[in-house]
Image (cartoon, rainbow, N blue to C red):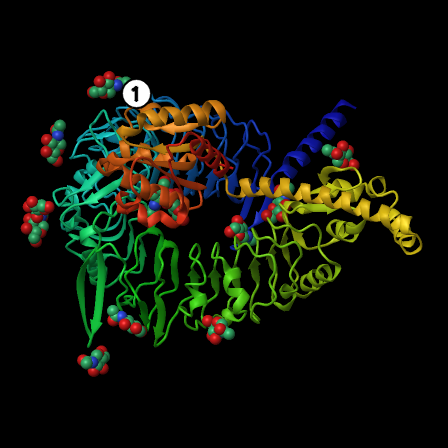
Amino acid sequence: MYIIAIWIILVYLYTTVHAQCNITLNTLEDKEADCTYQGFTSVPTNLPPDLKKLDLSYNRLTRLGDNSFHRYKYLEHLILDNNVIIFLDPKAFTGLSLLRRLSMVKNQLNVFTSYPPGVFESLQNLSALDVSRNMKTPEYNPYRIPVGELCNLRELSIDLVLNATFGQQFRKLHNLQKLRFDYCHVDILYNETFSDMPVNIKEFHMTTCKHFVVIEVGVLVPFPHLKVLNLTNSNIHLTQALRIVHPFQNKSMDAILFRGITHGNIKHDLDAVVLTQEMMKYISTICITTLDFSDNLIISVKNNSIVSFKHPQCFEHIMVSSNSFSLETWAINLFLFVFRMTNIKMFDFSYFPLRFKNPVFLDVVTKNNHTTIQRLEYEGRLEIHNITVTVPNQIQFVRIAHVMGRNGFREIKVINSFLRYLEVSYFETDVFPILTVEGFNSLEHLDLSGISSDITIGAGKIPLLIHLKTLILKETKLYLVLQTNSSILCLCPNIKNLDISYNFMWKMNSLWQLPHLTQLNISHNLFDDVPDVVTKFDSLTELDLSHNQLTTIRKNILSWIDTQHTKFGNFKLYLSNNPLICSCDTTIFLRWILTTKVKLDKNGNYSCWVSSLKTINYTRNVAEDFHHYFVDCDSTVWIKLGISLLVSVLSTLICITLLYNFRWRIIFFFFRNIRRFAEKGLELNFDYDVYVSYSDDCISFVRELQKKVEDEWGFKICFEDRDFIVGESIATERATSIHRCRHVIFLVSPSIVENEWTRFEIERAKYEKFSKNLQKIVVITRNIPLDNIPVEFSTIWKDVLLIQWPFEKEEVQMAWQKLRLWFF
Ligand SMILES: *[C@@H]1O[C@H](CO)[C@@H](O)[C@H](O)[C@H]1NC(C)=O
Ligand SMILES: *[C@@H]1O[C@H](CO)[C@@H](O)[C@H](O)[C@H]1NC(C)=O
Ligand SMILES: *[C@@H]1O[C@H](CO)[C@@H](O)[C@H](O)[C@H]1NC(C)=O
Ligand SMILES: *[C@@H]1O[C@H](CO)[C@@H](O)[C@H](O)[C@H]1NC(C)=O
Ligand SMILES: *[C@@H]1O[C@H](CO)[C@@H](O)[C@H](O)[C@H]1NC(C)=O
Ligand SMILES: *[C@@H]1O[C@H](CO)[C@@H](O)[C@H](O)[C@H]1NC(C)=O
Ligand SMILES: *[C@@H]1O[C@H](CO)[C@@H](O)[C@H](O)[C@H]1NC(C)=O
Ligand SMILES: *[C@@H]1O[C@H](CO)[C@@H](O)[C@H](O)[C@H]1NC(C)=O
Ligand SMILES: *[C@@H]1O[C@H](CO)[C@@H](O)[C@H](O)[C@H]1NC(C)=O
Ligand SMILES: *[C@@H]1O[C@H](CO)[C@@H](O)[C@H](O)[C@H]1NC(C)=O
Ligand SMILES: *[C@@H]1O[C@H](CO)[C@@H](O)[C@H](O)[C@H]1NC(C)=O
Ligand SMILES: *[C@@H]1O[C@H](CO)[C@@H](O)[C@H](O)[C@H]1NC(C)=O
């Protein structure tokens, strides 16, 4: 009796435990077990013994006992991530002589206490060990992890502890190629820190040091054969990083990745970076394939130092985005330099909020096969010169996005070019260069977002691009062009993917026949009905209609969608964030949502306005509880009213009144939703309402303004003397403050001419305005004739609201009134 019971329990346990792991065969017919999220507290012992891969992530293992994996001696890949393992028994991995990869990320293994000697002894074939993200707090102790036993190890990922001393056992890792530190607790790296590391290391990654790390210049001397140096996002400062690369002078490296390593640091007297030739003297001698200098607070580049590299032919990928230096005097040199990179494949120069003072434009003139460069000083007025730029033909990827500057080019020429990806977006310019192709072109991806389409494709600036697969025209005011020319897309007849979101379109009568179009994105527009043109695209399988003003979808569109789905076996439809209505009139649509096989976003559960109950609920709730919501749909009020309409004047009146009421409700609903959707869409999330830029002779007026705006109107002002955080770099502080404000007010008074920061603030404000964060720029002039206003303002005139502050009392009242209105 008991035996049977126990036997039953055992069988039960066996089958359930077994059933919890998902055993599959991979493409090589190897058995793999996926045992994630099963709450195991010990290693299951009933899986097939011939497993090659075992994944036990997200369980509750706390300790690996001796011979835990004895049964699975064919294992090659073992994953124990996200458990709570704090200790390994000395024979925990016995028998795993074929294991090649072992991962124990995010446990509680301590590099001093958790690994007994001999624990790795049987892992003779182990090639990759990942024990990173275990040391959650800074602690100091020498490393006692017996890695010396892993003579075949090629990749090691481990945490970097405070005052790290590694020890002799690391010297034995003769085959180690790749060293990666994750969870970084160091604050000083000494010359000796890595002296115990084997010399053959080729890749060094240290990317999570959040606290500032002081680095002695000899720290990388133990790695003479390094090919990849990845310090991305560690808080090191570019100045230090450039100093430690001296061991690699005159060598060649695959990648130097210094993105986002500079954060202002008052304590160590390090602020924004001014690149000089002295700083670049080591790195410039290295032959580098991939260089990333992005996001490093580089505010100025002296003496062409960024183009001082001795081996330009080595570069294949260059990223210098998101810095703050202006091209001022060396733009030409940069341009010429790019031409000397004969193997360049990718060039990214984006997110440059520039501060132009006396910019010199890059004028590249091609005449009789000779390219000459002309300098062109800023003369206060933009002159268009007929300059042609030829894109180096081996380059494949170019991104020049979010750049504020003037464009001096007339023509961009691609001749027999391998260029596949071109993004020229959010470029503030009045004149867009004409793009011409000669010979073959390979362009597949073109992104012209953020530039008004009437100066790009609407102005005939784009040639026929037969290989183009993806065209992105976000925020391009496309309606301007479509109104007059509905065949603009004839220049890319073979595109598969078209993104025309954020274009304020409410109707679209025709695009071009695009027989290969499979993805169409018309989200973030103002469509209140799905335009019929979409049904003309026979290959369409993905349609994004989210963030529009749809209340329902018509029956013929629904059946077309179903047809497409049947034809291609799949169709994706996005409908979220539309002011859908759940009413008697939309029941067909509601039922369709519930029954269709088409893949809907949000699982087909959208919020909708339930007209009968005057509340918002979800389409699924409504559709599933149909009768409750629409009791009188069939015997309907509406039909009755319709009949009455025919017979009685009185009923007509009632009907009109009803419809009217209903309409008002809808309009009100729309209004609320449009605002809500719009604010959400833009992710408007400001800490302050207004940033005020002023100079000394305005302080009394600022007080007055503060009283009015904060005390009376209840808005929040951000101004320098009160709200700046002490110790931050002043430029950063200004830039972030402007970013955090909804509007900007410039108080222009006679002394503003001397205020150096005004120009910077104007540039930032322009940038924010252009990147759609900022809503209004207000310029208030006081005691200064319009002629004396600094010329810098002339560049933003068209975007600003101007108030010449009056003297008369009544007029002052009016001015306040005006200001108040503008803020809403
Ligand atoms: C097992 O894996 C297959 C293929 O990856 C998957 O379709 C299935 O849902 C999984 N089953 C369980 C219980 O996780
Ligand atoms: C390592 O694996 C290979 C097969 O992949 C095997 O021949 C060899 O014996 C293994 N080494 C050890 C020490 O077990
Ligand atoms: C780390 O080293 C520094 C300098 O040698 C020393 O001042 C500090 O006390 C050490 N920290 C710990 C936790 O040992
Ligand atoms: C570190 O090494 C460099 C040479 O690689 C040397 O110039 C420097 O003096 C050393 N620093 C210390 C503190 O030993
Ligand atoms: C460099 O480090 C970052 C952050 O850890 C990582 O995402 C990236 O893949 C690394 N780059 C290379 C080339 O390994
Ligand atoms: C690098 O090469 C240059 C010129 O070839 C030479 O003058 C310099 O001494 C070399 N530097 C090192 C560290 O080898
Ligand atoms: C760098 O330029 C400054 C002037 O801007 C000049 O005084 C200095 O000599 C230049 N240094 C070098 C190394 O060319
Ligand atoms: C320009 O170069 C092309 C090919 O490189 C050559 O055929 C042509 O004769 C050259 N023209 C002049 C004016 O040198
Ligand atoms: C540039 O070319 C246009 C016609 O293509 C011409 O009207 C204009 O005068 C030229 N400008 C200059 C500066 O050569
Ligand atoms: C519309 O635009 C296309 C492509 O730029 C052009 O070929 C066509 O001539 C234009 N049609 C009209 C009527 O302007
Ligand atoms: C459509 O465009 C919007 C906005 O640009 C984007 O958020 C969305 O992911 C796109 N939809 C698809 C399906 O890619
Ligand atoms: C939404 O509908 C469900 C089902 O009819 C109902 O239980 C729930 O109370 C409704 N929610 C609201 C906010 O009206």
Q: Does residue 88 appear in the picture of this structure?
A: no
The residue under the point 30% across, 20% down is: 140
Q: In which quarter of the image is residue 432?
A: bottom left
- Depth order, front residue of 422/312: 422
Q: Position of residue 48 (x, y in %)?
A: 58, 42
Relative horizontal placement of residue 381, taking residue 584 as reference (left or right): left
Task: Indicate the secondary structure of the residue bearing disc 1.
Answer: loop
Residue 465 visible in the current orientation: yes
Q: Quadrant of the N terminus?
A: top right
Q: Which of 125 and 463 is in front in this view?
A: 463
Q: Is the residue at mark 1 in contact range of ligand 3, meaning its CB lies under 8 Å from it? A: yes
- Horizontal placement of 356 versus 623: left or right? left
Above/below status of 780 relative to 443: above
Residue at 23%, 38% (x, y): give it.
753
Q: Nearer the viewer, residue 343 or 478?
A: 478
Q: Quadrant of residue 153?
A: top left
Q: Where is residue 671 in the image (x, y as percent from the top left)?
A: 63, 42
Q: How many marks?
A: 1
> What crowding class fits label 1: few (fewer than 14 Cα within 10 Å), some (14-19), or many (20 or more)?
some
Q: Mark 1 points at which residue?
A: 140
- Residue at (20%, 61%) from the top-left corner? 336
